Amino acid sequence: MFRFLKKRILQQMTHEVNQKKQNHDNPNQIFPTLMENIEQIKRLLHSPNDLIIRIVTIGNSNHRCAIVYIDGLVDKDIVNTQILNNIQLGMVQANKEIPANDKELVIELENEILSIGELKKVQTLDAVMFAVLSGETAIFVEGTTDVLMIGTKGWASRGIEEPVSEALVRGPREGFTENVRTNTVLIRRHIRDPNLRFENFQVGRRSKKDLFLVYIDGIVHPEIVKEVKKRLDSIDMDDAPESGFIEQWIEDSFMSPFPQILHTERPDKACASILEGKVVIILDGTPFVLIAPVTFVALIQSPEDYYERWMIGSLIRILRYVAAFISLFLPALYIALVSFHQGMIPSKLAFSIAASREGVPFPAVIEAFMMEITLELLREAGIRLPKPVGQTIGIVGGLVIGESAVQAGIVSPVMVIIVSVTAIASFAVPSYSAGIAFRMLRFLTMLTSSIFGLYGIILTYIMINVHLARLKSFGLPYTAPFSPNFKHDLLDLVIRAPLIMLSRRPKFMQTEDEKRMDTKGE
C-alpha cells in the first residue's frame, strides 16, 4: 500500500513538472487557473504602473474573474458601468441562476450580462496582449481558457478642426485627425455607398498600428488595388509613426523629386479621389492620409476648383500653372538674360537693370544663390519657431535683410524683386511636396543657366519632361492625360469645363464604372 501511494505521488509530481515545463515552452497558452494568467501577463509587461488588474466575484457566486486593461487607453465609464457593474450585479438584479459550469458561465456573460456592442472571444495570449495594448479590456474567467475582449477604447484625442496645411476660401472646414476611427467615419459621412471598402492591415513589427486601404469596389481598377495590397504587405519595419514612412516604402521611384503619392488632411479631397477610382491609405496616429495613384496634374489642382463656377476655377488653375513656371524658372531666366543674352532685354529695361547693378560686387548667379538660400533659411526658421514669433521673423526678417542688402550694395533691387516674386509663386502650388520639388529644381535651373544661358534652361526643361514621361505611380503614367493623351480628360486639365460636361470619370484611371453623372436622362 505504501509503495502504491509513493508511486502515485511520484506520478503526480512528474505530471506537474511536465505541465509547468510545457507551459514555460508555450508562453502563448492561456491557463484555466486565473492567477497563472495574471502572473504571465505581469511577467510579459514587467508589471507597469498603468496595468490595471481587478479580480471580482461574479454575482453572488463563488466564481471569480479578472478584468485587465491599460489605464489611459480605455474609457473608464464603460469599464465601470458596462463591465464591472454588470458582472457584479447584473445577474443578481435579473434574478438569474449562475451556471455551475465555467464554459456555460462565459457564454452567459457574453450573451446576457455584458451589454457591449464590440465583444469577441479569443484563445491565445498573443491576441489578448495585442487587444489590451490597443485599448480593449480582457476578462479572464476562472476555470476556462476562453477570454472575452471588450471594445473600450477611449484615449484622449484631438477634435475635428480645419486643416492647417490646406486652407480654402470656400469648402468644408473639417480635417482628418490622428484617430483612425474618426477618419474612417469622416469618409463614410461623405460616401454612403455599400461598395465602399475598408481593408485593415497591421503595420510595424513592434507598434502594430492599424492601417486602412479605402476604395469603392466597382469603380477602382482591380489591378491598382492588387498592386497597392502587394506593396503594403511588403512593409517590414518596427514602427510607422507617420504616413510619410508608408509613402516612402511603397512609392515607385525614391530617386525622383516629384511625389508619386499625394497626402492630404481634407476628407473632401480624399473622397473625391476615391470617387475618381483612386485608393486612400489611412494610418492610425497621423492626420495625413495618402492618395494613390497620382499624376502631375493632381499636384496643381485643388478642391476649390470645383466649388467655384467653372470660369473662376479655370482662372485660378491657370494662375497656378503660371506660378509653378515662375517658381521653377524665373531666377534662372534673370541669370541667363543678364549674364549671356543682354541683347534680348528691351533697351530701357536693360539700362535700368544695369544702373541698379552698379556697384554690386557679385555676378548675377552668386547674387541669386545668396538671396535664394537666405529666403530658404527664413522660411525654415519661420516654420520651426512658435507661430506668433515665426510669422514675425518671416516678414520682418525678409524686409530687413532685403533692404539692408540693397543699401549695402551686396545685391541689386531687381534681384530682391525676382526672389520675392518667386517665393510668392511657390506658395501658390497647392501640394506642399510639389512645392518642395520645384524649389529643389530651381537651384538646378539656376546652375545650368549660369553655365549655358538660355540653352541650359531649355536643356533642364527637356530633362525634367523626360523624367516625368518615364515616371509612373502604381503603373499609371505620371504625365497622363497629357501623355498618353485622353481627349475627354482635357476638359478637366488646364481649363476646368462646366460641371455638366464632366459626366465621365478620368479615362486614364480605367475605372470599371466610367459614368459619374447622368446628363442626358440615360
Image (cartoon, rainbow, N blue to C red):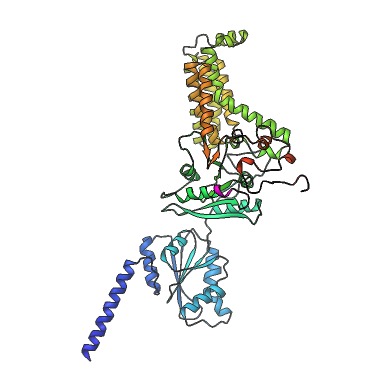
Up the image or down, 290 lies above or below 31; here it is: above
The dominant secondary structure in magenta is loop
x then y, percent, for residue 147: 46, 70
Give residue 322's quadrant in the image.
top right
- Can the viewer see residue 179 in this picture? no
Counting labels gives 0
x then y, percent, for residue 14: 26, 77
Q: Which residues are magenta?
A: 217-224
Residue lying furthest left: 3
Quarter of the image where the N terminus is located: bottom left
Q: Residue at x 59, y 26 (%)?
A: 325
Q: Residue at x 55, y 30 (%)?
A: 392
In this rendered view, identify the residue nearer to me: 284 or 343: 343
Q: Residue at x 35, y 63 (%)?
A: 43
x then y, percent, for residue 27: 35, 65
In this rendered view, identify the residue nearer to me: 512 or 337: 512
Up the image or down, 245 lies above or below 12; here it is: above
In this rendered view, identify the residue nearer to me: 65 or 201: 201
Q: Is residue 147 left or right of residue 298?
A: left
Q: Is residue 520 magenta?
A: no
x then y, percent, for residue 403: 54, 19
Residue lying furthest right: 521
Q: Is residue 222 magenta?
A: yes
Up the image or down, 457 lies above or below 392; here it is: above
Q: Is residue 208 left or right of residue 352?
A: left
In this rendered view, identify the residue nearer to me: 163 or 202: 202
